[in-house]
Image (cartoon, coloured by chain):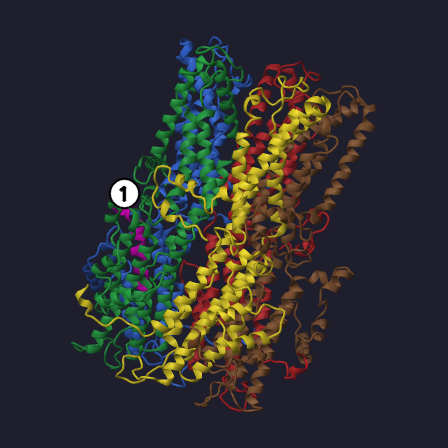
Chain colours: A brown, B yellow, C green, D red, E blue
């Protein structure tokens, strides 16, 4: 689920961003506490081994401590923040573009509601048909409902493709969350009729089939045009063009799913960050001084380190928070159709679109508030 | 309120930006003086404790000063400026895009004024109806007024959504500032008629309802088209399409409100900056030398620090100004529909749009300056 | 005036950019010589005081020199180049976008010239009316001239708003430069007729009124359509739509004037840069050694500094050039409608647009080169 | 082939990006193992020579070690990460834009299917022709098939141009992979008819000819319009306009192929990275101490380096991974129509487009699921 | 001429970018060898003077060497890579946008070929006129040829403006390269007819006149429309609109030529880079030790520097390559209509456009491959 906190930061207050630190859902703590615990575990194990075992083998210890000192210098050579900055920029750009391509039926549904109707030519009427049980009106209703249903259907088919691995390989828990593991579920949820499903299944191709409802869409528009429910080529063209925009969004979502950020880039970032902290396991070890063992080595970092370093590597923890947190931003956003706290709430979007689009083309079709004398108001 | 200072920097002068430093409203001082005072308070408390209490417990002091020296090194490890640079870029991008999506009725009102009118076919006329009390003209006026009112209504409904927490939870002061805490207020301010409000309330859905006036909009357009007040499908299509652009802006504002910058990113930035200054409370402490206590520790940063460090941590203050100020830029812009000095003046926008749109479709409809002989001029 | 130098760098030559260094107009030298002289003046004053007065008060000198050493370390803590890089990126983006929104009448004038004319239906003609003193032709000419005049008028009204403070508060010199200090001047320069000015003034509103000529514009289009000078709704719609694009540009210019870069951001950058050089006044002082006074302090930066430091702080000057120059880029571009060397030449643009638009709709209307046999050529 | 891994990172898990490190196809390891092995080989050769040969010539060794120490300092002077960050940003931008310009026939095929058909005017029909063996229907089918075939043909001609060097100079292996080495192959694969090929070959020009099928396209549209298979100028205009969008994409692909990132930029990046590692061959050599030879030089980096440095230059390897990997990102993406693991699967795209476009205009033309009572469902 | 190397990097190979280093045309070596030789010459002259002359004047040498040590520290203070990164980003953005605005007649020529023709209404025909010597067809051919010629003419006039200084001031060599030094040449090359040239010259204005052919363009369209060669207002509007897009591109090219990157920005970058290397002339000098003169100074950088520094300032050379090369990227791209190796091949573009546009509207007009039975193929 998306974490919305914009109201919490509506005003700059004392420690304005501070209160955001105490959120758990979608927080950085939730995302990396496992890595942190693991890292601390290994760090203290090494420290223990160093203190317990190595004191007895001075020469081995010398080698170990030399190694630690050496790798500690590494941190000055890898500009982690630079590559993270550029990488996260790319990821955030893609993340927002994917949101921009989530298909909303709002444009289509308003155009459909206006253009696809029984066009009464009677001069006296106010533009709507007054007859009860008018066959044309009923047909128009049926067409309108079909069209918006197909829009929603195509969106669902796309979301299934974009999240298709979840459907096949994932655990029971995820399966519950995903509403449409098979095309069967789409059918039984009422997004397809029996005959549509047959038609859909009868097309054998190895390609993605999410665009098939749009062929029905245009055929239906053609019928409506021929039957006079769409009054001119101009309005027909608008209806098709808007549908094409909707279809284009679906195609873009497929593209973002297919063309990831190049694997090499992700790997380089990942190796840099993980490698940095693996080396930090050694480089930030406390160099044991004379109090514990005999003096083996004169290259101790500084006297003051004796006191705190071994107990809690305090600024390595802050580095961990900083760099690992930054990378987790990328990790969370790289596929926004997953199950992360920040991922788009696809189910909510599907429900919203379905409800709103049927409201617009059916319930609210031709409903206007009764006229009143506006002059009173303004 | 927006702080407009572009005229102050119209020309590059001696110390051109300098004069901007003496503004208070919307300034960086106003934004962070609380944090600064707090930080200084704690800093001097720690210094006091160090000087008063710890001198008596040399071993404890050793531990304390070691800790201070250690954390001071941290500042070289966290590239604050890097993450702030990238983060603020994202925030400023979103801030400007939100401005770009503020709906202005200008395009719509001009198209409505031109296309929705009594189209006189009389050859002799100059395009406007000369009859007094013409029924068609009156109807056209009524429709035009309705349409622009609904445009404004939809904008208000959206602004209420975008700022909805303010309406429910906030203090009395804010309530006064927000003009439309409930839908009742929208009605009594004259943006809705009685029957519209009933229709609006009768639609029961958990989804946002800001798009509902647009269904009335298209139904009214349909009536006008059937009654001949809109002369062709081309002009009808233009009117709907422009309305869709307006509606799209409203939808984008809702999206920006719903999909924030990922919480993780904000948290990482926030922890980095706050963490930096929490550590600086210790790391920038004056190491007490021999004059006060007995010499405990030889790792004092440098002799010169004795003189100023303890009195005023001068460059830490500048860092505070710099980093905290940069973060406050983000904090102020992250929700531009709040109550900050820099936030968009929604009330002013609502008033302007209302006034201008009624002027255009009503008062100025068909008003042209009388013809004169242009040839004289050019 | 804009500094155009693209021809000077058309080719990469030896020291290609080098020759740009010898330009004065619009140059970095012109922009900051006052700051530079001021800084040097203060710097040498402090050096003098240090050498003259402080030698006599060793303890005071100790404090002074400690302070200098300390602040010198500050320069490693403030990443000026980083914040300047990001800030200048934002400023340059806005600067170019403002240029992109400068309204050019070219699209409009060509459409007007083609679509708003006496449409002769005579089969034999070549598309233009052959009658002398044709009333319809004269009316079309009058309309075309009005429309482009209003386009120019709206642009001037906008430019006056964008530069409005100049008109009221500024010195005599600037007033001369600005051509239209009052609406009276716009009228007497012939951009408005008497009746237009009356109509314009009669509309009382606190809002900007630059959009009012566009209401006349559409009313005139309506008349032309009804009189058959515009042949169809398609061409009418094109004319309105192009006008809307033009109007949209004007609106964007108003927006850029109203919504500045947040004051906080500008202040933070400004404090960082100015603060840096204020501290550099002390931090880059020559530490006086034993030859002048008695040795007070052993923390002198290095022996070699004795020789040059006090005479000319050579690399501080280069830093000054670099950072101050970079900030001046921002200062110059932040309001491109001011009076800087690089600011857009609004007067030139107004003149160009006026001349070109009347040429297109009047002089060159229906002027084609006589037919010749193209076959000869190709 | 494109490496799709978005499903692997759908959720932030423990070591979420970690599992991506174990992929081989498209991985950073696969891309640079040759460089790595070569570098290590040379590094150890130099180390060997140093140890074996130079010990005998102390003066020569002194020169050698001085050189090593000197070049080691170089690494602090070249900000590799900075230029790589900016360069990779440009490359990734171009890479994605090229993907965005890959032509998909989806928009065109749906418009063709809807607009280019036998428009039955019979009132009773449902919009489709019921006659068997209707001549008009057959002609429409033939036209539709031609049009989409030409769309695919133009795409293939473009892909051949974009990858034209591959066709002529490359090894046998690549030739197999590329399906259309000559125009003959395009013909025999059925994308051109005999007469089309003759027409195509008969146009003699040194310019690219990929746009020629579009001249046939518009001529065919003209015929269809005259024969009544396209019902109005509005729909005709839509068909041409969509084709123009498709053609524009092809033109952009040609542009990206023609206008590379300036060679200078690529060279500077390349010299910086390669130069860095060539110097690292010397700079990261172990300075041999007293145990092997007699002490020649006192400027050894640090005592601890003796132990590990000569055996494995551990952090130089990590630098190698980091910088070389980052540059490989650029190298892989700079021409996305090559044969890299990440390059776009042109063959797959061609096949998909061919299959889908014929499905849409032929098989699925006028196929609608039979009507059912939608009311049951919702 | 543009350097196209995308085929050389189609695949990631061993040392993939390496082979690009051996190109000369458009290479970084070609661009800066003059600067490099000059720098080396001065560097060695200073070294010589130091060694020869200064040894005799120890006090002067002390001053000289102190100066050298001091300026060497400067390199740590100027973040060259940062400002270069941001500046080159801006330059590359403009460079690509200018390419995007190069006008291609492809869209226009296809629309002209389709819409401007003898529209036969004969039912039996296949859409093209069968009459020999049909007057209407001949007229349509003549119009089509004129229109595309004017498109090319306007492009040439623009390219002359964008490169106008070349025409007037430049050397003989450049004059040969530029094909159209005067309007006379444009005429004699056949882009204008006699009467067009007269009309063009007769318009006296100080403004740019590249837009004048477009006024003829619309007048010709008007005639064609009235004569029935353009069948409807919809197709007329499309033709004008496409022409406007083409004209808009020309206007943008003029804008990019007029509004350069602010001179200040270029100067700051230029001073930073040149200043850096001027100081490096001193800062990277070998400090002469005891072997040559008597020991004057103990602040020598390090003993090892004695051996190589004086002979070849190896890493300064690499810095030179790196920073100067990066700046040369900017220098080369800042005016892409010059004569650099990477600049757009305007002549080639003019020739291509001319050839292709006449092919499309004349030779290939109404040429379709003969029908064949497509069914065989697919």
Question: In x, y percent, where is residue C166?
Answer: 30, 49
The percent position of residue B168, horizontal first and vertical second, equals 59, 61
Give yes or no for residue E161 being in the magenta stretch.
yes
Q: Position of residue B243 (x, y in %)?
A: 46, 70
The span picked out in magenta is E148-175
Residue farthest front in this picture: B172
C128, above or below E43, in the image: below
Q: Is residue E132 left or right of residue B322?
A: left
Give the overall secondary structure of the magenta segment. Answer: helix
Q: Secondary structure at mark 1?
A: loop
**How many numbered circles does the render carry?**
1
In terms of depth relative to the viewer, which is nearer, B347 or C245? B347
Q: Is residue E130 left or right of residue D131?
A: left
Residue nearest the observer in this picture, C15 or B3: B3
Determine whether, in the image, residue E141 is placed left or right of residue B243.
Answer: left
Assess whether residue D37 is covered by the magenta stretch: no
To which residue does mark 1 refer? E170
Q: Quadrant of the C terminus of chain B?
A: bottom left
| Direction from residue E279 to residue B79 in the image, left or right | right
Question: Does E17 sit above or below residue C224?
Answer: above
Where is E70 relative to C166, above or below?
A: above
Question: Residue C281, how many percent across, how many down?
Answer: 43, 26
**Label 1: few (<14), some (14–19) or many (≥20) C-alpha neighbours in 10 Å:** few
| Any part of residue D237 in sight | no
Does residue A370 appear in the picture of this structure? yes
Please give the chain letter of the residue carrying mark 1. E
The quarter of the picture where residue D295 lies is: top right
Using the rendered view, name the quadrant where residue B112 is placed.
bottom left
């Amino acid at each position: 689920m998306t974490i919305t906190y914009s109201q919490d930061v509506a005003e700059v207050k004392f420690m304005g961003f501070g209160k955001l630190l105490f959120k758990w859902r979608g927080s950085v703590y939730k995302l990396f506490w496992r890595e942190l615990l693991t890292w601390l575990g290994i760090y203290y194990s090494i420290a223990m081994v160093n203190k317990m075992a190595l004191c007895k083998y001075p020469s081995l210890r010398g080698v170990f401590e030399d190694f630690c000192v050496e790798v500690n210098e590494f941190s000055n050579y890898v500009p982690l923040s630079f590559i993270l900055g550029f990488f996260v920029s790319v990821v955030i750009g893609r993340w927002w573009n994917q949101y921009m391509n989530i298909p909303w039926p709002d444009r289509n549904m308003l155009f459909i509601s206006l253009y696809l109707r029984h066009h009464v030519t009677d001069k006296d009427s106010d533009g709507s048909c007054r007859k009860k049980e008018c066959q044309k009106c009923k047909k128009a209703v049926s067409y309108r409902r079909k069209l918006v249903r197909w829009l929603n259907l195509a969106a669902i088919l796309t979301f299934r493709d974009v999240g298709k691995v979840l459907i096949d390989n994932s655990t029971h828990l995820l399966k519950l969350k995903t509403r449409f593991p098979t095309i069967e579920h789409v059918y039984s949820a009422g997004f397809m009729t029996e005959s549509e499903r047959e038609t859909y299944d009868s097309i054998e191709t190895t390609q993605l089939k999410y665009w098939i409802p749009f062929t029905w869409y245009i055929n239906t528009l053609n019928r409506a045009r021929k039957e006079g429910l769409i009054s001119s080529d101009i309005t027909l063209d608008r209806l098709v063009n808007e549908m094409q925009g909707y279809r284009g969004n679906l195609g873009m979502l497929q593209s973002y799913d297919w063309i990831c950020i190049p694997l090499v880039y992700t790997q380089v970032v990942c190796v840099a960050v993980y490698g940095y902290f693996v080396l930090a396991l050694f480089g930030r070890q406390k160099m044991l001084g004379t109090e514990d063992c005999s003096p083996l080595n004169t290259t101790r970092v500084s006297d003051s380190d004796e006191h705190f370093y071994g107990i809690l590597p305090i600024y390595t923890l802050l580095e961990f928070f900083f760099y690992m947190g930054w990378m987790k931003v990328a990790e969370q956003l790289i596929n926004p159709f997953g199950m992360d706290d920040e991922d788009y709430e696809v189910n909510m979007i599907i429900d919203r679109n379905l409800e709103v689009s049927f409201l617009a083309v059916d319930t609210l079709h031709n409903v206007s508030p009764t006229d009143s004398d506006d002059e009173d108001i303004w």
